[in-house]
Image (tube, coloured by chain):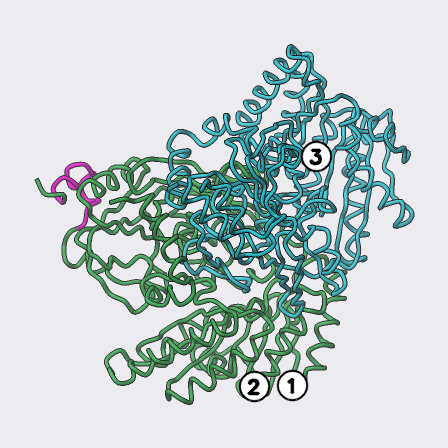
Chain colours: A cyan, B green
Amino acid sequence: MTWLQELENCITEGQVLTSLANRYSYSFDASFGEHLPEAVVKVKQKQEVVQVLKLANKHLIPVYPRGSGTCLSGGPLPVHGGIVLDLSQFPKKIDMRPEDLTVTVTPSVLTAKINDEAEKHGLMYAPDPSSAHVATIGGNLAENSGGPRGLKYGVTKDHVLGLEVVTPEGDVIRTGGQTIKNVTGYDLTKLIVGSEGTLGVIVEATLKLMPKPPAVQTMMIAFSNVRKAGEAISKTLTSGILPAKMEFMDQACIQAVENFQPIGLPVDAAAIIIVELDGHPEALQVERKIVEEIMNDMGAEDIIIPKTDKEAKDLWHARKQVSPAIAKIKPTKVSEDATVPRSKIPDFMDRLQAIKEKHKVEIVVFGHAGDGNLHPNILCDQRDAEEMKRAELAVEEMFEAALELGGTLSGEHGIGTMKAPFLELELGEVGVDMTKRIKDAWDPN
Amino acid sequence: MTWLQELENCITEGQVLTSLANRYSYSFDASFGEHLPEAVVKVKQKQEVVQVLKLANKHLIPVYPRGSGTCLSGGPLPVHGGIVLDLSQFPKKIDMRPEDLTVTVTPSVLTAKINDEAEKHGLMYAPDPSSAHVATIGGNLAENSGGPRGLKYGVTKDHVLGLEVVTPEGDVIRTGGQTIKNVTGYDLTKLIVGSEGTLGVIVEATLKLMPKPPAVQTMMIAFSNVRKAGEAISKTLTSGILPAKMEFMDQACIQAVENFQPIGLPVDAAAIIIVELDGHPEALQVERKIVEEIMNDMGAEDIIIPKTDKEAKDLWHARKQVSPAIAKIKPTKVSEDATVPRSKIPDFMDRLQAIKEKHKVEIVVFGHAGDGNLHPNILCDQRDAEEMKRAELAVEEMFEAALELGGTLSGEHGIGTMKAPFLELELGEVGVDMTKRIKDAWDPN
């Protein structure tokens, strides 16, 4: 009996997909890679995950867990064939314990739903990837996703208290727990979150909630000079104020969004910064004035304060539209997320400008500038081999620039298959070796 | 040539201690264990750490890194003999980069010094173990120390961006980096922080700083009923307010502190809660009123608002005196830090009371009640074998109670040698196995 027959025998009919059309649907994500799996299993319960992993372990078949497939770095792509494990069909459980400020969820739950449920209790689930309304928490956990609110509240990993995980050999472990503080044993929770599905399959997670801030204040600031905008960000962050969000969009992004879904962004500005302060209304008034002063000192062209909640929401909606809007400009979008220390943002912007000119590639820049996490996107066409070659060189130089400025290859999208070749550049030979040792110890096959 | 001779040959004279008196000085920490090492090496630079670890790896000699020895769980104790590596003599480097909101330090720096330096730039290093003025950051990193401010700001691990580590085989790796966000590769940083010296020796760390809150507001609330105090804590935390600190002291602690260093605590109260709110002065007024209302609703006997900064400082000083004060009551202090979900604090207090009565042991309770992290301390006399037996049984039941209530063995002190026998109770057999696999992969010898 082949492993595929064995798989079909042990999993309920209809949950194992092997037709070419079905396999093709699972061969891509939101990056530009493409790899065909040999089979797809839509798992609906922990026991099925155990069965698939035990079987795959026995037959040495690679397994790739997957949520909604919104990954920008190729994490769920079956690069060596094998089985894609689709966890999006798991029962969607959101078990709120507001009195403990915790919630337990299954991997198939959409991230935005967790925050919606928390808000009913005056609480908040802080991580807010821009894809939260379509991405699953399972994918967020695997990739340790960030988001605009990461500036003040940190990324996914900072909000995970415990996990239930099926190991590569098909055993079930519980890591961490339900308490806010826990130093019992090695921190397997934070090792597994962000390990991109290589150390096990998460089947349940307990997350930390926090009181929802009583008020928010959105501001948009326009600059006629990109470097000045970068300096204004640094200046704000060393003024004693920590905004919840501090986002950056360059002119190309502004124009792309306005072409895609006009909401009245200043298309002539070289760059805009969108800020969200949160806290008590009294404190927000004080902080807003300080930010206004800093922005004026740094030569802001215009400061726009939304007059209504709707106007503020529209601004943030515009920010969320950047990715789909720029995807319309050219067929291929190489989305990077190199990250630098905050004070190096102006320098990094200069370097990006130089790379753009040198390689004659179209680069648009946006991102979570407040934490040094920019998203330079190269817009190109995969069918144009010569242009793709230039894009590749540009990406390589971007990584080099980020590392030279004391930064990292990836702030929030993960390494996946896209950045794997560059890993040693950052971790060093021994660092990669120590990483491999953990993988080998947990997954000898 | 013996390994000891080889060691003396490769390390500068005077830095290798082998006399019984010297070795004895390194045989204990702030727990009640005692183990004699064969040698102590006072390392002063990275290269010496490399040499010691390479030599120890070759000769299969265990190595125990150590800072100031303030550990409450026996982490630095040489349970199998071998070498104690004293890192407290490393050059003390505090390299502030206020514009990046980061600082790079060597392991020998006292934790409180980092915060002192940060304050000069209007910043704060948030973790504040009560021993911060005598403990080194190296020890804090090894044990992932907490502290009162953990309630709002998290523990040591939440503030570490990158490490330089000498592996058990004597190689040097850098983990993480200087950026606030980083998802490049496995999170070796968070794996090593809290691994209690078992995965390598930290020789440098880059830490996250944050803007120092513009104002703080201290409050002390007295209760005539312990359970009510516990309920008041839960109530506050679900009201939308997240205090920076929320500490608990029972009557025995209050009286011990007053006997040790009188500052006017209410010795008749069954328990007190000390709260610190932080943020903008305007916001603090609002939050203070809400906390006062909750405390009154929950039947508080008295609410004391310090009139001056000095009065507030005295209150926090009193809280810091608990450990030394109760150590005066009886010769042996078994300090635990079992932690439960916040809503289970009242239940945990009931369980502690029952354990105290059942085993006729003296238990005093204080701690960071806001995050469910209590410190039940059993006061006993190591020379009284019968009493120690009862204390042991009480500790075991404390752990069981914590785990039954969904808690953990250790919230912030670490497992060390004291709690190692109980590890499997929490992690399960496979969990312990997966932990061992990592240790074996990194340190085959």
- Tell me if mark 1 has few (under 14), some (14-19) or many (20+) residues whose alpha carbon lies within 10 angstroms of its own: some
Q: In this view, does B102 lie above or below A173?
A: above
- Give how far apart the Cα atoms at labels 2 and 1 are: 8 Å
Residues tagged 2 and 1 counted as in contact (Cβ below 8 A): yes
Quarter placement of the C terminus of chain A: top left
x%, y% of residue A371?
64, 39
In-front residue for pair B76/A61: A61
Q: Name the residue under label 2.
A: B269
x%, y% of residue B47?
29, 35
Kind of residue indicated by mark 2 = Ala
Chain where mark 3 sits: A
Q: Do labels 2 and 3 share a chain?
A: no
Circle on res. A367: 3
Left or right: B387 as drawn, with respect to A44:
left
x%, y% of residue B255?
47, 83
Between label 1 and label 3, give the one nearer the viewer.
3
Chain where mark 1 sits: B
Q: Give SS at disc 3.
A: strand
Quarter placement of the N terminus of chain A: top left
Q: Quadrant of residue A296?
A: top right
